[in-house]
Image (cartoon, rainbow, N blue to C red):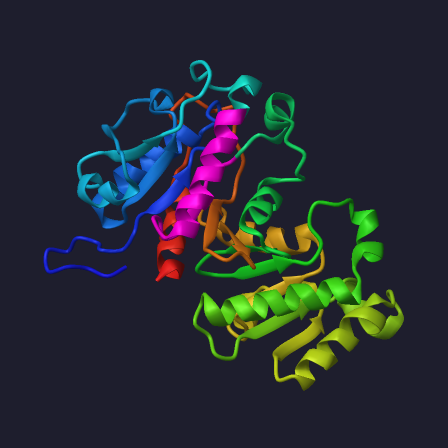
Amino acid sequence: MTQTALGRPTTAPIALTCGEPSGIGPELAEAAWDALRGDLPFVLLGDPSHLPGSVPHHVLDDPAQALDFAAQALPVLSVPFEGPRVPGTAQPAQAKGVLAAIERGVALVQSGACSALTTLPIHKQALAEGAGFAYPGHTEFLAALSGAEDVVMMLASDQLRVVPVTIHIALAEVPQALTAELLERRIRITHQAMQTQFGLDTPRLAVAGLNPHAGEGGRMGHEDIKIIAPVLDQLRREGMDLRGPLPADTMFHARARAGYDAAICMYHDQALIPIKTLDFDRGVNLTLGMPFTRTSPDHGTAFDIAGQGLANPTSTIEALKLAARLAR
């Protein structure tokens, strides 16, 4: 983010979508602004009447105005919702407003009016009941809006970056879902993103095995030999720096992490347990393969604490910071 002589950022602001208004999203938006203020201008897309009111806000006509007002108040582009905020209880009647905020955020980033997109958590059941939302999740909806053919979920912090090859499926379904084609796509998208977004000419990727001890030569499963290893061999011949398949139980200590830039894991918990153990509050969800930068905090709507002033904004703040760095 470039600076003028006065220290004022000159790039476009980040678009922050409100997510589920009955969750902790409105509180996180205010807390993030209070922490960042004019140092990292962003504009909230949502209904200003749903904000808790713990900090001042300013309704904008144009996102570019966020650069002028971010130091004094939380900049907001108004997206009206039906009815008031009811912390802790999802409101399906407000689902169309939630989706409209996301659609507007994507449009602003694609037009260049905003530099990146950070999204607060949604509630898929409320969206399905109130607006017929049929996508498996937030990321798939964003991919459809952006025209992305294939996207990859990365969880990132200062200590570790991980990519799960298979995500929200039962553990029993992973061996069947883990195909050579899927693994190759995930590695290629990750490799390209590490070059284009993180600025690494030759990214070092560590690839976990599926089975204990990476199969131990076939004694503990054959997927590591028959599926994972041939893909890695092929991509190495193309010049990629790949390590693996590696035993997952020895990949995540400090000395091992120093040897790679990102880890490719075979299933959800294999990827998320290490990063959440190492850096629970600062983990950020980053979507790779989009035509723009998209980040989000690594947690959900937290209905159980919504409206109580207990929400921890750290992951949201880190998501905005990462979006700003990558948008450069």
Residue 234: x, y in percent? 73, 80
Q: Quadrant of the C terminus?
A: bottom left
> Is residue 47 positioned above or below 181 on the image?
above
Q: Is residue 39 visible?
A: yes
Q: Which residues are magenta?
A: 96-121
Residue 191: x, y in percent? 57, 70
Residue 33: x, y in percent? 29, 38
Residue at 52 percent across and 39 percent down: it is 299
Q: Residue furthest left?
A: 6
> Is residue 301 positioned above or below 52 on the image?
below
Left or right side of 185 for 37: left
Residue at 68 percent across and 65 percent down: it is 185
Q: Quadrant of the N terminus?
A: bottom left
Q: Residue furthest front?
A: 111
Residue at 22 percent across and 34 percent down: it is 73
Left or right side of 231 for 114: left
Residue sitting nearer the eye, 301 or 43: 43
Q: Mostly what secondary structure, the magenta segment?
A: helix
What is the quadrant of residue 71 in the picture? Answer: top left
Residue sitting nearer the eye, 72 or 214: 72
Is residue 205 rendered magenta in the image?
Answer: no
Residue sitting nearer the eye, 69 or 177: 69
> Is residue 175 positioned above or below 72 on the image?
below
Is residue 112 rendered magenta in the image?
Answer: yes
Q: Residue furthest top?
A: 83
Left or right side of 198 for 237: right
Residue at 51 percent across and 61 percent down: it is 160
Q: Is residue 251 visible?
A: no
> Is residue 308 positioned above or below 182 on the image?
above
Residue 24: x, y in percent? 45, 29
